[in-house]
Amino acid sequence: MSTDAPLDPSGADTPAAAPGTPTGLIHHPYRAPADFESPVAAVHKASTVFFPSVAAMRARTWVDKSAYTYGLHGTPTSFTLEARLATLEGARHVILAPSGLSALTVVDMALLQAGDSVLLPDNVYGPSKDFTRHELAQWGVSHQLYDPMQPQSLADRLDERVRLVWLEAAGSVTLEFPDLPALVRLIRAKAPRAVIALDNTWGAGLAFNAFELGEAGLGVDLTIHALTKYPSGGGDVLMGSIACRDDDLYQRLAWTHSRLGLGVGMNDVELLLRSLPSLPLRYAAQDAAARRLAAWAVQQPQVRRVLHPALPGSPGHEHWAALCSAAAGLLTLEIDPRHSSAQVDAFVDHLRWFRIGWSWGGPVSLAVPYRARGMRQLGTSHEGVLVRLCIGLEDVDDLIADLAQGLARLDG
Ligand SMILES: *Cc1c(COP(=O)(O)O)cnc(C)c1O
């Protein structure tokens, strides 16, 4: 290609360097034609972003996403993912973070200061409790746990120092489904200055609408998601998001996020953009498979109880039924306490298709045993050992056969 004939007039301002020089390899007049379109957005990677002039450099702002300033503040690729994620929940603003956990901690850091108090459900995602007990406590932020299945337990802890209340539905591992509309109404009435944040990873923006909880004007202020789970669906990406509707709240979150220097890699964003169109299909398939497994598991003599919000009798089933149209692909087996913890570990060790590992939402089914004792500070306790199952995309009959051979060993 001749360097003295720019192919696009937009490149005409770039002078052609002498042939055969490194400068010519870096400063090149060629500009690809602009109107390329394909199913997946282009991957724009950058640390440095160019400005056409010093005046433009001084004038640009990233915070309203009207322009590009620096790689950490986003490229067309991350802006596109943020906009697409916003449509899931009808949010106005979405911020990407390097993991689901970092999305949680940004919210804590943006909204809490020394002297404030934060409330967490007893069945909250464990590492969120850890951050609260360690870093937030060190910084002078106090916290209390509440029993999400007892609205009075939350009411008793709402005072003027509470600036942030976390909700989670369904609860981590034990999958209790709280009465979200009742909890939100209570917080609005008793702690009007508190921000209400929901970890909506389980619902994925599909099971229910967190910003419209069954009646107009009733909703949470922000949601966080571990995009690591269903939105990615591959078991190969770590990412989180924060979504909200309010402009001022967005600004507070966005500035803290930016000052902390939290960026995401555009190759990871690309994977999310590729996975997002199939999210509803995968979620529905894993929901259907988990329900079949749950219905089978309740009939097994080694299983004392099956925890799954869509299963009648599971804690909070009625709240799930009142709000939700779908459930995630998670269920937890409460193994009869006549079986020892070592026996249950051996059951998990001998599963063939279920692999042992954290996280969920990918193609591979996973099993993790949890010792129930000491898991909760308040409220319901469970007996014996819990086995949390996350259902992948395998044939459900194969998964049932696998669990059947494993459970049979418990009696052997
Ligand atoms: C996995 C998970 C997180 C954290 O996500 P990571 O990307 O693994 O940091 C947060 N909340 C819930 C409910 C989760 O399941």
Image (cartoon, rainbow, N blue to C red):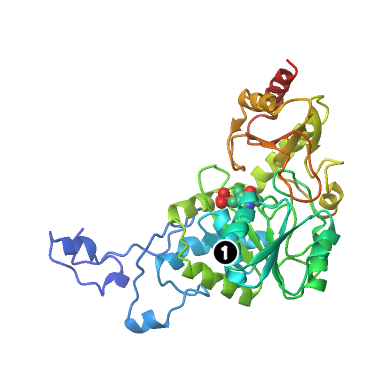
Task: Give coordinates of residue 180: x percent, y percent.
Answer: 79, 59
Q: From the image, which quarter does the N terminus lie in?
A: bottom left
Bin the neighbour count of mark 1 within 10 Å (Cα to Cα): few under 14, some 14-19, many 20 and up.
few
Residue shown at 86%/61% (left/top)? 152
Residue shown at 69%/53% (left/top)? 124
For residue 194, what is the image quadrant? bottom right
Task: Give coordinates of residue 133: x percent, y percent.
Answer: 62, 57
**In-front residue for pair 202/146:** 146
Vertical comparison of 337 with 9: above or below? above
For residue 27, what is the image quadrant? bottom left
Number of numbered labels in the structure image = 1
**In-front residue for pair 48/179:** 179
Q: Is any atom of residue 231 visible in this view?
A: no
Task: Give coordinates of residue 181: x percent, y percent.
Answer: 82, 62
The residue wearing badge 1 is 138
Task: Give coordinates of residue 225: x percent, y percent.
Answer: 62, 56
Residue shown at 37%/62% (left/top)? 46
Q: Is mark 1 within 8 Å of ligand 1?
A: no
Q: Is any atom of residue 325 visible in this view?
A: yes
**In-front residue for pair 266/330:** 330
Q: Is residue 396 left or right of residue 36?
A: right
Three-letter amino acid code of the residue under disc 1 = Gln
Vertical comparison of 389 with 11: above or below? above
Q: Residue furthest bottom?
A: 55
Q: From the image, which quarter does the C terminus lie in?
A: top right
Q: Secondary structure at mark 1?
A: helix
